Image (cartoon, grey):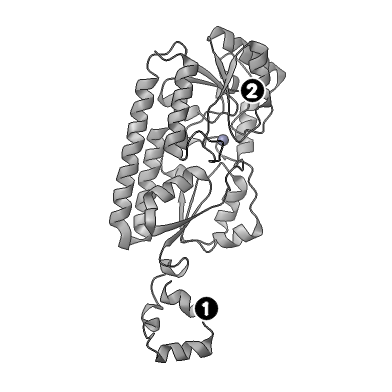
Amino acid sequence: MTVMNARRLIPTATLAGAVTLGLVALSACSSSDAADQKSGDKLAVTASFYPMEFLAQQIGGDHVSVTTLTKPGVEPHDLELKPRQTAELGESDVILYLKGIQPAVDKAIDQSGVGQIVDAASLTALEKHGTEVGHVHGGDEHSADEHAAEEGTPDGNDPHIWLDPVKYAEVAQGVGAALEKADPDNADAYRKNTDALVGKLGALDTAFKQGLTDTSTKTFITTHAAFGYLAERYGLEQEAIAGIDPEAEPSPARIKELETIAKQDKVSTVFFETLASDRTAKTIAADSGLKTDVLDPLEGITDRSKGDDYIEVMQANLAALQKALGAK
Ligand SMILES: [Zn+2]
């Protein structure tokens, strides 16, 4: 515990006694160490949901204490914050979030008054993938726009950047720089940790590239449209049952269209995920005689996840894609 925190807990009368007993360093630190006041001697980082939490933990290491707004097992898109969480948000030294995926969180962060706010979406280039819903075989663009609007991205961009290891590494670099700035005393450690993480993400990218080069089909069917960046990176075609928002229900026309695509593109598997409903995916699979498997959008880690962290679950995703696409 730091001297600053000790002072807060000690009533004034006792404090006077403590000073005479030799705790004379109190006044020396009272004007500095803004970061140290809030969580012992660690930098207090609030992460909006798992992909941000993983970056904060990997890069921050022992020098940060990370709080995550989205609890494990909670579907993040429509998260509403409890009043206690909103209050705690204002106590953070650094907030790390991804603007456009959690509208209620975006609003609370805007109003938090915290000086160091890092928006992951500003650290890489975003693309629009909402129109992937139905674009291939002349489907309905209108519903794609609606999904994007529900998501809360003002310009309709796809927020699922962390599922592309290359874009995620770009975000990691930006987060590393932000932590260095917020806590210059530990800049060397943040830089070293960032380099290590970027290295792991580079290896993951290589594994995806090599593992998905030669496959018997390039098309995969998922529940919600989380894998647009991943598909783009590795030359695959994502066909989503719902839109970018996992709660959106597909139209009967869209379901029929997916069944046609499955036949034309020799799709073997319909993917569902760990946190969202899998009812529609299973129905489509049963109706078309297809298999089902899990492709995890990594919006949270639970006991049901096929791995303990981002890297492990992405490796499981790669294995599932290789199997479904008929990798040689
Ligand atoms: Zn999502």
The residue at the far front in this view is 303
Local crowd at mark 2 within 10 Å, few (<14), some, or many (≥20)? Answer: many
In the picture, measured across the screen, residue 247 lies left or right of residue 199, that is right
Amino acid type of the residue tagged 1 in the rendering: Leu
* Residue at disc 1, secondary structure: helix
Q: Which residue is mark 2?
A: 281
Which of the marked residues, 1 or 2, is nearer the chain's N terminus?
A: 1
Query: Mark 1, residues whose alpha carbon is within 10 Å: few (<14), some, or many (≥20)?
Result: few
User: Would you say residue 125 is visible in this rendering?
Assistant: no
Q: What's under tag 2, amino acid-wise?
A: Ala
Q: Which residue lies at the image location 65% right of the left edge and 26% below the top edge?
A: 143
- Residue at 41%, 58% in the rendered image: 64
Q: CA distance from mark 1 to mark 2?
A: 54 Å
At a point 40% along the width and 36% down the height, the residue shown is 167
Q: Residue at x 44, y 44 (%)?
A: 122
Above or below residue 79? Residue 208 is above
Q: Position of residue 296 (x, y in %)?
A: 53, 31
Task: Tell me, for residue 253, which label it has, or none.
Answer: none
The answer to whether mark 1 and mark 2 are in CB contact below 8 A is: no
Whether label 2 lies within 8 Å of ligand 1 gets the answer no
Indicate the secondary structure of the residue bearing disc 2.
Answer: helix
Residue 197 seen in render: yes
What numbered label is drawn on residue 9?
1
Direction from residue 218 to residue 214 in the image, left or right: left
Displayed-image quarter of ligand 1? top right
Q: Quadrant of the C terminus?
A: top left
Front-most of residues 254 and 36: 36
